[in-house]
Image: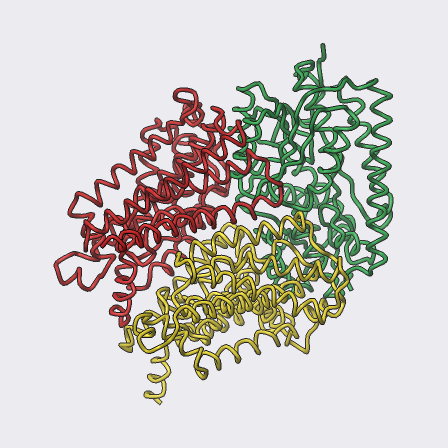
Chain colours: A red, B green, C yellow
Amino acid sequence: MADVPVNFFHRQSHMTDETISTERSRRGFFAGASAQIGLFAIVALLWVIFSTLAPGFTSPINLFGIGRSLAVDIVIGFSQMVVLATGGMNLAVGSIGVCAVMLTGFLLQDAGMPIPVALAGGLLLGGALGWLNGFAIVKTGVNAFIITLASASLFLGAMLILSKAVPYNTLPPEVGQFGRMRIWGYVSPLLFIAIAIGAALYVLYRHTLLGRQILAAGANPRAAEMSGVPVGRVIIISHTLSGLLAATAGIMLVARLGAAMPSVGGEDWLLPSFLGPVLGGTLLAGGSVAVIGTMIGAALVTTIRSGLLVLQVGNFWLQLFLGLILLAAVMADRYRGVFLERRSLGRK
Amino acid sequence: MVLAREEFMKLLCDAIRGLAASSILAGLATFGVVGLAQASDNKIALIPGGPHPYFAPWEQAAADAKKDFGIAAVDFKVPQEWKLNLQTELVESLAAQGYTAFGIFPGDAVGINSTMTELKDSSIPSAALAGCAQDPTDAAFCLGTDVYNSAYLGTKELIKAMGGKGAIVHLAGLLVDPNTTLRVKAVETAVGETNGEVTLLQTVADTDAQEAADQKINALLAAQKDEIGGMIATGYIPSVVASKSLRTLGDKRIKFIGIDDDPIVLEAIKDGFVAGTMAQNPYGQGYIGAYVLDLLAGGGCTIKEDATWIETPQTKRFIDSGTLVINADNLTTYKDDLKKVTTDIQSSFKDKYLTCK
Amino acid sequence: MNSLLRRFLMVEWSGILAAIILGSALLAWLSPAFLTEFNIYVMLRSFCVALLVGFAQMVTLAVGQMNISVGALGGLVAVLAGGMMEKLGVPMILAIPAAIAIGALCGLLNGVLTERTGINGFIITLATASAFTGINLGITQSIPFYNMPPGLVAFGSDRFFAFPYLMIAPIIATILLGLFLSRTVPGRHLLAVGGNPHAAELSGISRGRITILAHTLSGTLAACAAILAVAQLGSAQPTIGSDWLLLSFAAPIIGGAALTGGHVSVLGTTLAVILIALIENGMVLAKVDPYWVQFVLGALILAAVWLNRWRAVKTGTD
């Protein structure tokens, strides 16, 4: 760990645009809140543009679809965010997710368990696998990237060996019905679950000792250790939480698809899991989280994608426009920030 | 080395000419059998699992179906990537925009079902094209290739080419795809029927990406090219890569049966490096699919429950869109054979499988 | 003797090397096919593209950046090269340098955008990745360019005994990159900026210019990897690069690079790529049941990393 002092400087240099952090928490909070307002404004602007250009964008069926995809993306983002907070990462989110999916499917279909028991089983497995990651990282001292890269393969492999990749597609009908359920005609209950999780995480990081300890350990492990934070334990807890959240996202997908299948999760979750948190202002270097930012970040991407689909922008070229609009959005947000900073400096 | 230029052009011209002929034929057949098609105001979307060369003929099929059957719109819409959630989002979005019927290649045979159920709840008919959705499903029917049967017939063909004995290798696709499991079973069954004359040396899976496939197949050949008597590929990518690898190796002793008609595979058949390939009928799937969906979406017709459906391990309502073996003998004519199959299925579809007012 | 061994163990990549030797011995014993000329050729050939992909990420990691667009950029370069040669009839001699130059330009774009906007490179390259893939699919509509010049295809498959000609490119790249990072001023600046951006800036190094340089280099290397992939596959497939991302990080990081920047190892990355190629080759050779492949892959990576970790703890180079 000879490079700790170096990292320390590195992190200090990024301290301005974060939401919740231990050091300078008040200023950080306000700076972060304003960054989120900016991102939120851009998402809102895109909504206005898309619904003006394409009336289908705000039709109940489309709103329902957006909300449901968004809900899963947000929870996947959270599962990465909680380890980013400690300065680590979890490449196994998708693998943990699919393990939880298959166990839930097995418990429901083959073992005939009642739904709450099966859900608890899936969540428990997710937490346990996350704990395993955390434990291995702390005990071996090997960096989280490599441990979770290997465990992603191990977990996925174990799932394949045990399930032989056979999907569970005759689950109790209530599961699929929940995924198709519409509240007020256009909101998916999954979205409420995602928001509730967000609220819980917000409280955790803002108002609890554990939350502050996690952020302190992420910002500067050595300093945190010296001031009495049990860094190892905090890292293990964060990974357990990450596993739990990945399992939650997986189980939300079971409801959404009405089936438990081995092809969900895996590597497909990797980029979306980083995208929401990083767009929202979570630092890859650790020590900060942006709970609301993660939700808005995920909403930005879902909005652009859905808007382009509704506008029927050229089939094969769609990805190009997706990239360009995303780029324009983050740049607009950035320059808005710079502009505000200059203006406030001018006033002084 | 891979394709001499003029040969490639010739192939291309053949393909274009074939397509043109087919659409004229199909067009005539339509007018003959159905009578003057009523212009309908349905909007039909044909949606593959993701960007993939197999589905390229669907674009032409969509345009032809629109013209021949007087449908307001038949559009070929491609998900950005080969991911189930992107496919379902595309379907949802198009449904929101007022599309009235969907022909879908299931990005996942199980995972697509909840979307199809939702479409049905909104009275929008959908059909599984090219590959099936796993029962229980709300897809109106499946028009495509029976993956189990195609793999089974392919293995039979391979065993025939090997003279009834030897050791074979199975190059399979994505392990988490339910279709792969069926194909693995089919190959094992066909091998089992030889009473030990043919053995299954190894199954190599997850060969659905070009580079991974190149590495695995070459490693396989390096390890046991002397023991291998034959290979069967049940995925598009491994059959392209294996065709290329066998050509590089210059070994005509190893018999190989691929799937689909990628130019690299066809060229290898022509030069004798590949014994044959299991052709599917993408154009027909798209063309007939659009035709039937148009009839269903108008509400004029419903699916006849007691029709003579084929039952496959995946679904009870299956229609074979035509599976045939392409080998050196029918390399230039197989497109006409598929065309004929397309015309036959399309012209008799209404009587056989639908109840119309 | 003992001190020699100890000194060897002090080198950070010695654990990986030991894992490679151990693995090779095991495979040679398990499968007689392992040491055949053809298998060595197959392994060396599969190592070529992967190494350049690893390097493409390594140079951005050196400055504490990431390039999420390596694969997308590679795919775009591959189809542009293929398209130029097949559709426009541009001779290979011009098309390949032009395609690599486009790759470098795409990298430059990544660098300039990251530097000028001050936005996290992760987000910038993620967005450009989407844009590059969009152009790739828009041009090809997912249909490959099949008609590559025979010379290029031969370069991708011909060999001198067990030595694939394809490997000439990565060997040159390894040497140049090694010299660049250790012997040249910009190379050393690259690591200085990654290690401690503030100190580097205080000593007069332009952090912005170095970041742009790293991204440009990354684009160039990814473009070279793409050209090799075209040669190897014999056709310009639009899917080239689609599974590079994880590999591109895994190789340098298993090879000892720090995700936070400032520390990379050309030799370590090379050995990590060899290790990965060995594991993948070994799995086919040892006829591992397909359902077990993922599990064994994970276990082997863990074992190799653990071996290296054990070495580090023992020798106190932790």
| Residue that sits furthest to the top in the current view | B357
Q: Position of residue A133 (x, y in %)?
A: 32, 53
Q: How many marks?
A: 0
Examine the rendered structure and indicate whether residue A85 appears above or below residue A187: below
Q: Position of residue A30 (x, y in %)?
A: 24, 47
| Residue that sits furthest to the bottom in the current view | C1
The answer to whether any part of residue B104 appears in the image is yes
Along the viewing direction, whichever of C64 and B132 lies nearer the viewer: C64
Q: Position of residue B315 (x, y in %)?
A: 61, 28
Q: Position of residue A299 (x, y in %)?
A: 41, 39
Examine the rendered structure and indicate whether residue B304 appears above or below residue A233: above
The answer to whether any part of residue A133 appears in the image is no
Asked which quadrant contains residue B214, the reply is bottom right
Query: Which residue sits at x=18%, y=48%?
Result: A210
In-image side of B84 versus B333 (left or right): left
- Can you say which quadrant of the picture contains the C terminus of chain B? top right
